[in-house]
């Protein structure tokens, strides 16, 4: 690429960052790597609103789940040395895990196909959100309480932070080192990634770390420091910077650490048991973007968002990190990539959305009668949006005329029926569901009042009236919480809204009844924890 093209790309990045170029907003930083060199690096906005410090080239951020590829790299390095096998049963290294009645391998953990319920969801159902301090022992206890899985190992994909906490623990058990020390000695120091470190405690002081902010609710607007109390390990504990991640991108072509075999292993996909392809490789996602192969991963933690995006065949990578909880680094990084690869051979044009009249019938609430799962579909300025369990995702048109989640983390492709009443959805591993439109005005099911307990969560939920409304009070392993709102959907399907400081999370809940019609329990499904049964205390078997 000629110098003039680099100048143009730099100016396009500056224009994309312009909305954050203010002294009253937390900000965003962007880096573009071409053939291993950081050719564009810009920042906009504030690292500290309180101290009036702007983001700079040396600003560091929590990169959250972008950490997962480094945890997988550690496992793969140990496998290359013969100290473990990716086909090993996890119980060989973690004997304290319960017997789930199915063999779970290290590979299942790396590919997010283990079926293990997500530890953050487990904690949330027990009343503990990310803002509440807890310990790694608390997280492990939550995983080890489980007696069921989301699905049979290898059969489906579901993102689970539990997988990567356990991978980090395996590294520590095998090496006798802490995961932070292993990563620093074997990866960061050799590559000169001097601003990258695993910082498990969110209270530790880190040089040049930008403060994470969330928008303050209410009419006053403004910002607040993002509260986060969970320890962070192999699932998301790294603090890093654009310059350091650019060094990691360079390693993908030079193989200085791990050689070409490590890069290939990280990007290796494994099929599901039904033969369908899994886009989730090993701490990285692999997919087609505008006709070229893209390898990426995002990161989300209260007050921080990251997108790490590579298109190996073009030599380009884009790194976008923010300390602004209302920002969208994923789509900004792809806008930067579009500017870098536009008009290159083999790059497809961006598909246009269907006309407004074709999308007009999409908004509404939908229910899958088979599973009790619900979806909310909306239009945001003409852009179609989906929302599942409270997590919003933008939709893009596909070649076959359907709408798919733009983020590769969401396996969701849908088409609305001709009569506008049914949403046909294809999810991971090719599984399909029919969601039908839900009419408004539902009433709560009768007979819900009572106490319900789940051994897997270690919590008792009490459904009782408070201030004229039926709510949930939670007595969990670590704390009490509530009241949680209950919303009727249809018949015996309801939503329960647990605490969340990232979005308005909801649980899809089906009321269970005995032969006599009396309520016997609740079948609870979150975004990353499925098939949890809360049994009514004192109910007849």
Image (cartoon, grey):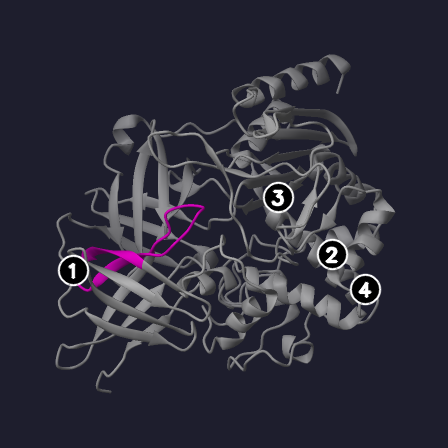
Taking the spot 47% from the left edge, 40% from the top edge, the residue there is 406
> What x and y, as percent, mark residue 313?
70, 37
| Residue 227 rendering spot, x and y as whole percentages | 51, 47
- Check contact, mark 2 vs mark 3: CB within 8 A: no
Under circle 1, the secondary element is loop
**Tag of residue 80:** 4
Residue stretch rendered in magenta on the structure: 483-506
Query: Are the residues flagged by discs 3 and 1 in contact, CB closer than 8 Å?
Result: no
Instruction: Count neighbours of disc 2 (C-alpha within 10 A) and say few if under 14, some if 14 to 19, many if 20 or more.
Output: many
Residue at x-position 28% and y-position 62%: 472
Q: Residues within 10 Å of mark 1 (few under 14, many from 20)?
A: some
Against 230, residue 140 (above or below) is: below
Q: CA distance from mark 4 to mark 3?
A: 24 Å
Relative depth, front residue between 318 and 28: 28
Q: Is residue 338 left or right of residue 60?
A: left
Q: Which mark is residue 444?
A: 1
- Which mark is on residue 73? 2
């Amino acid at each position: 690429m000629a110098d003039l093209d680099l100048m143009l790309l730099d100016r396009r990045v500056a224009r994309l960052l312009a909305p954050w170029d203010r002294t009253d907003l937390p900000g965003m930083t962007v880096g573009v790597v071409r053939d291993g060199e950081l050719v564009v690096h810009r920042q906009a906005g504030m690292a500290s609103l309180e101290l009036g410090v702007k983001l700079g080239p040396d600003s560091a951020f929590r990169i959250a789940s972008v950490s997962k590829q480094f945890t997988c790299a550690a496992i793969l390095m140990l496998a290359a040395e013969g100290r473990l096998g990716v086909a090993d049963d996890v119980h060989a290294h973690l004997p304290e895990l319960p017997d789930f009645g199915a063999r779970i391998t290290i590979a299942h953990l790396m590919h997010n196909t283990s079926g293990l319920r997500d530890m953050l969801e487990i904690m949330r159902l027990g009343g503990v959100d990310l803002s509440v301090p807890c310990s790694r022992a608390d997280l492990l206890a939550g995983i080890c309480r489980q007696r069921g899985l989301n699905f049979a190992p290898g059969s489906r994909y579901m993102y689970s932070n539990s997988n990567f906490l356990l991978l980090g623990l395996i590294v520590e058990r095998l090496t006798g080192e802490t995961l932070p020390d292993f990563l620093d000695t074997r990866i960061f120091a050799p590559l000169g990634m001097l601003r990258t470190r695993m910082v498990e405690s969110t209270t530790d002081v880190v040089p040049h770390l930008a403060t994470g902010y969330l928008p303050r609710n209410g009419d006053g607007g403004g910002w607040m420091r993002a509260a986060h109390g969970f320890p962070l390990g192999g699932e998301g504990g790294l603090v890093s910077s654009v310059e350091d991640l650019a060094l990691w991108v360079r390693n993908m072509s030079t193989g200085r650490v791990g050689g070409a075999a490590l890069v290939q292993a990280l990007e290796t996909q494994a099929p599901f048991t039904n033969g369908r392809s899994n886009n989730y490789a090993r701490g990285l996602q692999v997919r087609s973007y505008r006709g070229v192969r893209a390898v990426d991963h995002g990161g989300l933690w209260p007050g921080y968002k990251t997108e790490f995006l590579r298109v190996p065949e073009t030599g380009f990578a884009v790194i976008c990190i923010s300390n602004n909880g209302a920002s969208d680094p994923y789509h900004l990084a792809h806008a930067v990539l579009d500017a870098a690869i536009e008009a290159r051979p083999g790059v497809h044009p961006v598909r246009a959305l269907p006309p407004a009249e074709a999308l007009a019938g999409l908004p509404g609430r939908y229910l899958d009668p088979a599973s009790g799962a619900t979806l909310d579909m909306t239009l945001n300025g003409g852009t179609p949006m989906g929302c599942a369990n409270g997590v919003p995702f933008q939709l893009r048109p596909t070649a076959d005329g359907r709408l798919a989640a733009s983020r590769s983390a969401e396996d969701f492709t849908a088409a609305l029926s001709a009569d506008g009443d049914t949403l046909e959805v294809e999810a991971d591993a090719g599984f399909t569901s029919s969601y039908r439109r839900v009419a408004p005005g539902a009433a709560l099911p009768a007979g819900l009042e009572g106490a319900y307990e789940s051994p897997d969560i270690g919590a008792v939920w009490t459904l009782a009236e408070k201030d004229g409304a039926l709510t949930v009070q939670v007595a969990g392993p670590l704390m009490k919480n509530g009241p949680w709102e209950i919303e009727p959907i249809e018949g015996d399907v309801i939503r329960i809204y647990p605490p969340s400081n990232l979005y308005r999370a909801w649980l899809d809940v089906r009321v269970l009844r005995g032969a006599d019609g009396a309520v016997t329990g609740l079948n609870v499904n979150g975004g990353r924890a499925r098939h949890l049964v809360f049994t009514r205390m004192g109910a007849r078997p």
